[in-house]
Amino acid sequence: MTGSLAVTLRRALSQSDARVAAVTLAALLTFAVVVPIVVPGWREMPNLGAGAEPPSWAHPFGTDTLSRDLFARVAYGGRISLAIAGLAALLSLSIGTGIGLMAGYAGGVVDTLLMRFVDAALAVPRLFILLLMLAAWDRVPLPAFIAVLGLTGWFGTSRLVRAEVLRVRAEPFVAAAKNLGAGAARTIFRHLLPNVLGVVLVSAALSIGEVILLEAGLSFLGVGVQPPTPSWGAMVLDGRDALTTTPWTILFPGVAILVTVLAVNVLADALRAAFDPRSA
Amino acid sequence: MTGWLARRLAQAGVTFALVTLFLFVLMRLTPGDPLQRLGSDRPIPALEEARLRALFGLDQPIATQFGRFLESAAQGDFGVSIEHYPARVGTLVASRLGPSLLLGGAVLAVNFTLGVWLGVLQARRRGSRLDRWLGRLALAGYAAPTFWLAIVLVSLFAIEWRLLPAAQMTDPLLSPDAGPVAVALDVLRHLILPTATLSIVTIAATMRYQRTAMLEVLRLDFVRAARARGLGEQRVIWRHAWRNALLPIVTLFGLWLPVLVSGSVFVEQIFNWPGLGSLAFGAVIARDYPVLMATTMLVSGAIITAGIATDLAIHLLDPRTKPA
Amino acid sequence: MTGPPLLEVDGLRVEYPSKAGPTYPVDGVSFSIDRGEVVALVGESGCGKSLTSLALLRLVPNPGRVAPGSVVRLDGQDVGRLENEALRAIRGGRIGLVFQDPNTSLNPVLTIGYQVLEAVTAHRRLGKTEAKQRVLALLEEVGIPDPLARYRSYPHELSGGLKQRVMIAIALAGEPDLLIADEPTTALDVTIQAQILELLERLRATRRMAVLLITHDLGVVAGRAGRVLVMYAGRLVESGPTDRIFSDPAHPYTQALLRSIPRLTGPIDRLAPIAGVVPQSAAWPLGCRFHPRCPLAVPACSSETPPWRATAPGHEAQCWLVEGTR
């Protein structure tokens, strides 16, 4: 299985767009990890009162109205945004895979109940559920924010995994394993899980892009990452009214979101095409 | 057919009931309530608070509250808004429905004309530079944060170039005795930027679905047979091929509504558009339960209905389908 | 012979791009068809027969194209140079095309009547009622019972045989001078096959049109076609009058094809399928393309393409072993 997974990944990266996206993403990650270490000025305000300065050699992305260096803030914000997205996606995928496996494997009442719940949850836009949950806090702590994002993102995944389990379960080798006396746990972990991995991986890539956008949106609405912690969405909120006077204050964080999500989605596409060549 | 429809409707009813329960519980279980929010601005005397609690029924156990809510909701009464007291929720929602439908309809129109046309164009030129770049461009639009894109468009078109209004649905300076045409044109001008924003972020899905569906159909025998009988290219593409590639696009509608609704929250916020999105967001911040419940139920109801409509449309479009 | 032939094909090549350079699944095919004549194009699947017929109407599927230098003339008019309107007047107008599989060649979401009507109005300006009358007459002509009821039917409501009759009606809508029937019976039940062939024969006789019958089954050809063209690996290898082809086949490939059809008279143990398959167009052998499968091959066959040689007037084959005049 690992062998064929490597083959699939290589096939995904054989597309030139996917290679560009992978390199871009690697560069963004390096930027987000390294810059805050080298340029620690993301919360410092050296010339408070000087106002926002346009990009220069000293400040490649300029400074914001509180004269904080935007290069460092965008990098640090990237750290926050990517960490949130990664952790939340991991959480929602684990739940989604677990629930999907359970529903698909158990079948019967368990399956019906779970899927009815998922139907209902999918009929409410995720943003609304998120807003409802997040409004509970005046200032939401980061771990809670991540948890809430993760808890609202698994519905679609669980459905995909369940469908895949039903498909795989019908295959002879699973029945054979059961006949040979394999227990539930063994059947699930040895036979079902590896086979649903493809679906999960594609779903993961897509959900990371979605979570980055949601996180930015919620932070922009003021119910996500709270100042002074920089996040790309919150930075756009900060510069909101000043686009024509100090365009760089929202241009850079916005472009950062766009490029990241674009790269992630291109990779997700390539993965999907690699797992299912017909869909390309 | 009727048996299938009845089953489908029953299933939708169950889903909607679950949604209602789910929302109600979610709203009451998360900490914080409207009066607490009210109290954060200025202190409220304990007696006054108790009176308000009783007024909105917040002093009752959740089950009782839910029972009361269902009872009056069944009669079409969603109660009184807490934030906009004493406005009735029904009136409030009704006044916001028009603008939301207008905006949603405009985006839908753009998606299903431009998006479909571009998707078909891509399929016809599969693998060409045009196909690849249209795909990349659409994907970039899909990756753009809605709120950011809205701000950029406003700054450019409204503030920098002064071509279009920056916000609202109508010009407050428009003379009150302006004719219906002038009013319509004014609304249209205000509609352009919000529609553009939402279309840019949602058109990728339409294009992609249409392209894939069209590619599937274009390689089928009957398309070649249609050409072989001497039909014009436009007729071959639209009447023969596209007619068969329409089904996947119809299914997209059901998936697309939630995305549109979420996008509307941001767009209405930034453009000050008097729709349901901004109403709902205001209600979240104020924890205005009655308004929140009504708007969310309305949106979910629309999504569930869209699902049924989609299935029905598929049935009507394809003479072969016999729904199981 | 009076005047130029109806259809003249000279050096027809169909080109497909590939990473290793272009390939030619149809590679230099030349023949002609006279008015009212029935010509059969015979060969195994994969030899380029269908592509040849599509190339005549410039309907080669993407990314292929008719290679420059190919000549297709209809009544002396160069089809290769036609565009848009003029090309459409040929497609379904002067040349009607009947496809192999009627189950996939009709649009599933449009009614039978609509699809025939469309073919009628594509080639003639007619009033609404007049056009509909025409459609009903065509459906009647191809032997569809109760045309008025069938007008509103969708393709999935008809049997395969009826669908093929509809396809034939569509091909006749433009009053063609040439009907190309590409394996018109392959997708049908054996009992229906004979009926369809009979219908084609009757239509040819009443309408005096030429027919190009494409088939992999030489058994279908006997008694129907006046002339036979045998195709192998993108090229014609033999052409001649049908009775000569059957009585005195010159090319080893034709001989092998004949041995592979069951006959009521011959001994059953002589029935012999041809060993091997037609190679892909990217891997066509040098010399005579049949030589790797040919039981009679000599060294010259694998190095040089044999010339055309005539064994009798109008009967030619492209083979080193044929004794004849060039």
Image (cartoon, helix red, strand yellow):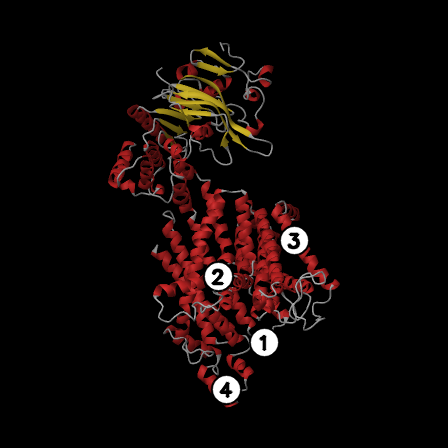
**Sequence-first tag of 2 and 4:** 4
Decide which of B215, B54 is in the foreground and name it. B215
Residue at 49%, 11% in the rendered image:
C326
Looking at the rendered structure, the secondary structure element under dot 1 is: loop
| Tag of residue A24 | 3
Q: Is residue B85 left or right of residue C22?
A: left
Q: Are marks 4 and 1 on the same chain?
A: no
Residue B298 at x, y percent in the picture: 43, 68
What residue did someone put label 2 on? B163
Name the residue that disc number 1 marks. Answer: A138
Q: Position of residue C141 (x, y in %)?
A: 28, 32
> Cα distance, mark 2 to mark 1?
39 Å
Pointer 3 or 1: first along the chain: 3
Kind of residue at disc 2: Leu
Q: CA distance from mark 2 to mark 3?
A: 36 Å
Q: Chain of mark 2?
A: B
Residue at point 47%, 87% (across, down): B51
* Rendered position, B65 above or below C46: below
Tell me the element at label 4.
Answer: helix
Viewer-side label of 4, 1: 1
